[in-house]
Amino acid sequence: MQNVLAYFSQNGTEFVQMVATHLWLSAVALALATVIAVPLGILGARFRRLDSVSEGVWGTLRIIPSLALLLVLIPVLGTGTLPAVVSLTVLAIPPILINTTTAFKTLPADVLEAAEGMGMPPARELLTVKLPLALPVAFAGFRTATSEVIASAMLAAYIGAGGLGDLIFTGLGLMRTDLLWIGGLSVAALSLAVGALLSLAEARMRRRAGMVAA
Amino acid sequence: MPCEVEFEDVTKRFPGAARPALDHVSLKVEAGEFVTVLGTSGCGKTTMIKCVNRLVEPDSGTIRVEGEDVSAADPARLRQHIGYVIQKVGLFPHMTVGENVATVPRVLKWDKERIQARVDELLALVNLDPKEFAGRYPSQLSGGQQQRVGLARALAADPSLLLMDEPFGAIDAINREALQDELLRIHQGSRKTILFVTHDINEALKLGTRVLVMDAGRVQQFDTPKEICEHPATDFVRSLLRSGEFRLRSAYVEPGEGI
Amino acid sequence: MGAYLEFWSEHAEKFLDPLAEHLQIVGVTLLISVALAAVVSVALLRHPRAKGVVLQLLSAVYAIPSLALFAVLIPVTGLGESTAVLVLVAYNQYLLVRNIVTGIDGVDPSVVEAARGMGMSDARILREVQVPLALPLIMAGLRLAVISTIGIATIAATINAGGLGTVLFDGLRTLNSYKIVGGTLECALLAIVANAALRLLESAVTRRVVR
């Protein structure tokens, strides 16, 4: 216990640095994934063939253990931040994409019909009607992706990208309980905190879209 | 072996309800009677029959079937010897028609040949050709056919008492009349005791040897259809009679109009 | 390509032994997970008011990254397979219990009422009516649990539990791309084959039940 306090007083800045790196890696991966997955998802709702191909490709990538995906890029991209970001992005795409497609596929038909009947141009319809209604379900996919990315970002430390995983791996190497606990509990807390924030955001989106809160 | 049902000062209030569902109800149904229980929704008629097979437990009072207090028996065994039919039927979707009908005999551990014979006999009784229907699944049947299977299933172990909760409520008028006539036929052939809940006054007067009219958890009148029509006991009964055109089972039918 | 195949065939045991270890971990985990989930689910069905709380708890555990959970438990339960199995079983509870309970709750209430009215005991209703009708959802949960276990078990290599992760980590340590690619292929194939097999089973079951 004193070790824990000692750690924080000695390595406070290092710790903050690791948290920052961890969050930064996750954020970049999620941003890239969103930019790729959302347009693909929307298109997938329109074009069935794209949808089945997408589901096949990303559905398969999704079941492959993330560790394997992370490490398989190393012979190609080396170690460090780059392979970490690439594999985290690939990891984050499937949930976002699949949920976006589902969200757009399950838009209430009567609302869309009303919008078209009013003569709304497609771009405006997309922005003011479809996106807000699709947001809750799509966001649930983003939430799933976030928790998976924060979890997998821990492994990124193993390949030199930094992050809270470093604490855990060092702790494992030196069999230091304090490091293991600090590392483990920090990531757990981080993941729960982010998860809770996103849950609140999702609930608010649901209310705004007129969906009854679950 | 016909059986009588007796309610002795039975009261039931559901938590949060403004008034009791059953309010000191006392009555006696004689063996072999076909009693239709009539009233508007919320009057306690469904609660009443659910107390007989203990799907609902009364707060006070005693219910006796064949002279025995139902609260003394094991609920599952009690129900295995009482037929129960509900409006939504509740056929097991993952079993065939034959397997559905065979349910209680199977629970009672009858041997296979006896079960098979009984299933065929019952399907024929409700006018469903066993060869055609025994192997079908409920989703392949129409609403009327499903309710026939429900009836066959309830009769499978040959219970002396049948509880029916608005069984024909969801069925179209033409099929409903056919089912009513079949039920009358079955009753006349077997002399089972039947408690039949309905909110349709025509159905109540047509089917019942006696009609039990309920409102707000209390018995309004319990009498033959003829008596109810000629001497309604309360304003509620009077307004019920006024609310529907009706035909009676016997005295008021002109020759030739038939049932 | 040829060099890869040559390495793999020459050093087959370096790939197959970890695979066997991995299958063992996954197998043991699933047996315990299913048994525990069944007990928990039946308990929740008897005490429906606890459902919300228990599922929230299980989902919170599920949200914790695996390495973090390993890290926290190691000072208590030590390195090795038993810690890995403990964590894996804990994660699977959320997937299995949630689907079992949702599946059983989703059975048409009038079917259950009819069954009770006929005098079927609660145990018989569960066995002959509720579980068969909930089977599609239960199988889906099982499939998710299997895939999740296969995936997280790879990470268990970091805590000396063995399994396919060792191939990957060895390859990383020695910068041996034969091992990295071979290990990746093993992981991928295992996951894909298991998923396909379970999906087949799932649709076979669903076809029989949902008519």
Image: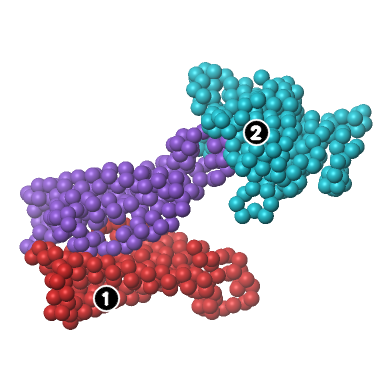
Chain colours: A red, B cyan, C purple
Task: Tell me the residue at 59%/77% (across/down).
Answer: A120
Q: Which residue is mark 2?
A: B63
Q: Position of residue B143 (x, y in %)?
A: 65, 40
Q: Position of residue A154 (x, y in %)?
A: 22, 68
Q: Nearer the viewer, residue B134 or B29?
A: B29
Q: Eyeballing the image, is A11 above or below B170? A: below
**At label 2, which amino acid type do we have?**
Ile
**At label 1, which amino acid type do we have?**
Leu
Residue C1 found in image quarter: bottom left
Q: Eyeballing the image, is C28 above or below A110? A: above
- Secondary element type, mark 2: strand
Please state the chain letter of the residue tagged with numbered disc 2 in the rendered image.
B
Please state the chain letter of the residue tagged with numbered disc 1 in the rendered image.
A
Task: Tell me the residue at 69%/31% (across/down).
Answer: B6
Both marks 2 and 1 on one chain:
no
Residue A56 found in image quarter: bottom left
Q: Nearer the viewer, residue C61 or A210?
A: C61
Number of marks present in the image shown: 2
Query: Callout 2: few (<14), some (14-19), or many (20+) C-alpha neighbours within 10 Å?
Result: many
Task: Tell me the residue at 63%/38% (across/down).
Answer: B51
Residue C200 appears in the picture as rendered: no
Residue A23: give its label. 1
Q: Position of residue C43 (x, y in %)?
A: 40, 46
Q: Residue furthest bottom?
A: A13
Residue A206: give its label. none
Question: Disc 2 to disc 1, how far (Cα)?
Answer: 68 Å
Q: Is C121 displayed left or right of B166 in the figure?
A: left
Residue B65 appears in the picture as rendered: yes
Q: Nearer the viewer, residue C73 or A19?
A: C73
